[in-house]
Image (spheres, rainbow, N blue to C red):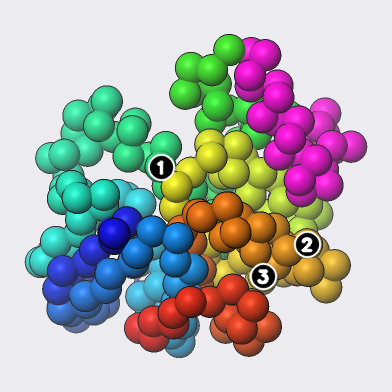
C-alpha cells in the first residue's frame, strides 16, 4: 500500500517563469525509507513544502493516504489538523521551528495542540527528551542552544506528534559525529517500528544503512 503518490506534479513559484520541476511522479509505500538527492537548487525543499501541504502543485496530483491534498481540502480546519499530525517535518534550518521560551514547552506544543491531557503530554515530552539526550535542557531557552542541540530539540518536537511520515531536510547539516551517529541509530529504530521516512541527504552511510530507495531530483 502506498502512503503517498505524486502523479506528474509540476511547480512554479509565483512571478517566476521557469518551473522548479515538471511531471514528477513518485510512489512511497508504507514503511519505506526514501533518500532524496539532488544538487543545490534542484527543488528538494520545494518538494517537501508540497508534501507538507505548505505549497501546492501547479499541475498534477498529490495523494496522501488515498486523499488528494489540495488547498481547498486543507482549508477545512479539521482535515488540515488531521493531515498535519500525520507528517513530521524537520526543516533544513530548525531555528525557524523554535519559538517557545523553554525546551520543554517547545516539545509539548504539538501534543498540547492535539488535546492530550497534561499528564500524557508530560509522558511524551519526557520520552522524547530522553530519546534525544536533551532531558538536562528542559528549562533552557531553545534560542540559546548550540546548532546541534537545536536540531535535537526540533526533532524531538516533531517526534512528539508520533507522525506516520517523517520528512527530514538535510538532517546531518551542522551535526557533529556523535550527534550524527545518534540520529542514524534513531532513524533505524523508527524504520524498524514500520514508519515511513523521506530524507534529503547526500550522506553515503545513511543511504546505505537506511535507504530502501533513492530518488534524484
Ligand atoms: N520562495 C521562492 N521564490 C522563488 N523561487 C524560489 C523560492 N524558494 C526557492 N526558489 C527557487 O526554487 C529552486 C529550488 O529551490 P529549493 O527547493 O530550495 O532547492 P533545494 O532544496 O534542492 O536546494 C531554486 O532555483 C530556488 O532559487
Ligand atoms: Mg533545500
Residue 105 to residue 66: above or below? above
Distance between mark 1 and mark 3 Cα atoms: 23 Å
Give the labeled residue for mark 2: 182
Q: Which mark is residue 86?
A: 1
Q: Which residues are magenta?
A: 118-141
Mark 1 against mark 3, which lies toward the viewer? 1
Quadrant into which the C terminus falls = bottom left
Query: Which quarter of the figure has residue 178?
Result: bottom right
Q: Secondary structure at mark 1?
A: helix
Q: Magenta region's main secondary structure?
A: helix
Looking at the image, residue 180 sits to the left or right of residue 44; the answer is right
Mark 2 against mark 3, which lies toward the viewer? 2
Distance between mark 1 and mark 2 Cα atoms: 24 Å
Residue 16 location in percent, x, y?
20, 72
Q: Secondary structure at mark 3?
A: loop
Number of labels in the image equals 3
Distance between mark 2 and mark 3 Cα atoms: 11 Å
Amino acid at each position: 500500500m502506498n502512503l503517498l503518490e505524486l502523479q506528474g506534479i509540476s511547480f512554479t513559484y509565483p512571478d517566476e517563469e521557469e518551473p522548479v520541476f515538471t511531471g514528477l511522479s513518485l510512489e512511497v509505500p508504507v514503511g519505506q525509507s526514501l533518500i532524496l538527492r539532488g544538487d543545490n537548487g534542484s527543488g528538494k525543499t520545494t518538494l517537501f513544502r508540497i508534501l507538507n501541504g505548505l505549497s501546492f502543485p501547479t499541475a498534477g496530483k498529490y495523494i496522501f493516504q488515498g486523499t488528494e491534498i489540495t488547498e481547498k481540502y486543507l482549508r477545512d480546519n479539521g482535515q488540515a489538523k488531521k493531515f498535519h499530525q500525520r507528517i513530521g517535518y524537520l526543516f533544513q534550518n530548525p531555528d525557524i521551528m523554535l519559538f517557545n521560551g523553554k525546551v520543554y514547552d517547545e516539545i509539548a506544543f504539538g501534543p498540547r495542540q492535539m488535546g492530550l491531557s497534561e499528564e500524557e503530554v508530560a509522558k511524551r515530552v519526557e520520552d522524547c527528551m530522553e530519546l534525544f539526550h536533551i532531558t538536562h535542557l528542559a528549562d533552557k531557552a531553545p534560542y540559546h542552544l548550540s546548532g546541534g542541540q537545536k536540531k535535537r530539540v526540533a526533532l524531538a518536537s516533531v517526534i512528539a506528534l508520533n507522525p506516520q511520515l517523517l520528512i527530514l531536510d538535510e538532517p546531518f547539516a551542522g551535526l557533529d559525529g556523535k550527534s550524527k551517529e545518534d540520529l542514524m541509530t534513531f532513524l533505524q529504530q523508527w524504520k524498524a517500528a514500520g514508519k515511513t521516512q523521506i530524507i534529503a541527504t547526500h550522506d553515503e552511510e545513511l543511504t546505505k544503512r537506511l535507504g530502501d530507495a533513492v530518488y534524484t531530483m
